[in-house]
Amino acid sequence: MLKYRAHLSEMPSYDVTERDWQVKVNANECNLQMPPLVEERVMSRMSYVAFNRYPNTETDSLCEQIAAAFSLPRENVSLGNGSSEIIEKLFYCFGGRAHKIVYPQPSFSMYAIYAKAAEAVGVPVPLEEDYSLDVEKFVAAVEENKASLAVVCNPNNPTGNLLSLADIEYIAQNITCAFLVDEAYIEFGGESAAKLLSQYPNMIVARTFSKAYGLAAVRMGYMLADAGLTAMVQKASMPYHINVLSLVTADIVYQMRQEYQPRIQMMIAERKRMYEQLKKIGVLTVYPSQTNFLLVHYDGAAVLNDRLEAQGIGVRSFGNAPRLENCLRISMGTREENDLWLKSIQDFAEERQ
Ligand SMILES: *Cc1c(COP(=O)(O)O)cnc(C)c1O
C-alpha cells in the first residue's frame, strides 16, 4: 500500500479532457488570438530571452508594472501560474486540519477541491434563490465557524452576478480572517476591490490573464495584498515558479493592455446581445451576467447539451452540482460563433414548442 497524503484518495479529479469542438464556449476563454501588434512584440521579445538564467529581472519587471498600475508598492504584488496557483496557495497557507474556509455555493468549483487538498474544512454558504449573496449570512458563517479564510468570486462564476463594492466592504469590515476576492472576470463588469486594500490588510485580490487578456495557455495570475501576507504566501511557493516565457509574454500584454479594450467591449456587447436573444426563448431562463459568459437554465438541459455536442458546440454543463441542475454555462465567442450556438438553441426550442 502506498502511503498517500490524507484526503487525496477521496478528492475528485478536475476533468479537463477536451474534444476538438467546432465552437468552443465551455471554459470562459477568449476565442480570439492576440492582437497582431501584441503578437509581433511578444515574438520579437522571445529572441532575446535569457534561457540560461533564473528569471529574476523578468519577475521584478512584471510585478513592478502591476504595482504601478494599482499605485501599490512592489511588496504588495506576487505572481502565480494562473490565479489558480494563487488561490491554491492561499488555501494551503490558511488551511490545515482545524481551519475552516468559507465560500459561496454555487461558485468556482475548485474552492471545495482546494479546501480538501489543504486539509481544511470547506464551508459553503448557499446563495439565495436568485443567486445573490446575502452578505450578512456570509459574515455570520465566517464568524460562527471561526474561519481562517473567506472567499468570494466577483463577478461570480458560474452565476455571472456581481457584488457591489459596498457589499465587499461590508464583508471586509465585519470579518477578521483573511478575505480573498477572486476577480477573474472583473474586466467585464464591476468595480475592483483593489482600492480597499489599503484600509483592510486582511484583504487579498486575485486577478488573471486567462480571461479578458486571452492568455489561458500562458498561465499567469497575480495577487494584490498586504506586504506581510504576500511574504507569507511567498514562503509557501517554490522559488522561480513562473517560467520566463510566461513572464515576458504577460509583461508585454500588460504594457499593451489598451489594445485589449476593443475586444473586451465587444465581448460585453455580445453578452448583452445574447442575453436579449436568449430571453426571447420562452422555455429557458437566462441569468443576468457581468462576465464573458451566460448561465442558462432549461428543464431538459442534458438533452439540449447532447444536441449542442452533436453539432460540435461545447458548452459547460454542471451535471448534478448543487443548485446548478439543468444549467448550462456558455462563454462569449466571436459574433459568428455566438450566432451558431444561438441558432442551435433556437432551433432546439422551436421543435419543442
Ligand atoms: C478561470 C478562473 C480562475 C483562474 O484561472 P487561471 O487560468 O488559473 O488564472 C480563477 N477563478 C475563477 C472563478 C475562474 O473562473
Image: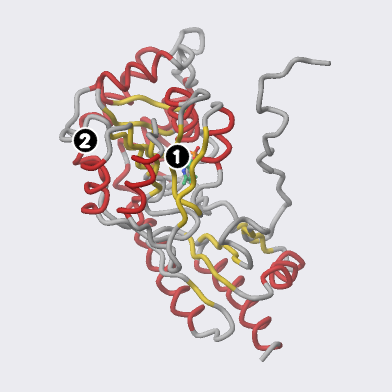
Rounded to the nearest angstrom, the CA distance separating label 1 from label 2 is 33 Å
Q: For the point 52% across and 65% down, which residue is it?
A: 295
Q: In which quadrant is the C terminus drawn? A: bottom right
The answer to which of 76 and 123 lies nearer the viewer is 123
Q: Is residue 155 left or right of residue 68?
A: right
Answer few, some or many: residues within 10 Å of disc 1's Cα (few below 14, many 20 plus, some between 14 and 19): some
135 in relation to 68, above or below? below
Q: Of the residues under marks 1 and 2, which one precedes in the sequence?
A: 1
Q: In which quadrant is the N terminus drawn? A: top right
Q: Residue 200: where, in percent of width, then height?
A: 20, 34
Q: Residue furthest bottom?
A: 353
The amino acid marked with disc number 2 is Leu
- Secondary structure at badge 1 equals helix
Q: Is residue 152 left or right of residue 75?
A: right
- Which image quarter: residue 177? top left
Q: Residue 328: where, in percent of width, then height?
A: 60, 64
The amino acid marked with disc number 1 is Glu
Q: Residue furthest right?
A: 1
Q: Which mark is residue 39?
A: 1
Q: Which mark is residue 298?
A: none
- Secondary structure at badge 2 equals loop
Q: Residue 266: where, in percent of width, then height?
A: 39, 63
- Which image quarter: residue 255? top left
Nearest-to-viewer mark from 1 and 2:
2
Q: Residue 287: where, in percent of width, then height?
A: 46, 70
46 in relation to 34, above or below? above
* Residue position for label 2: 197
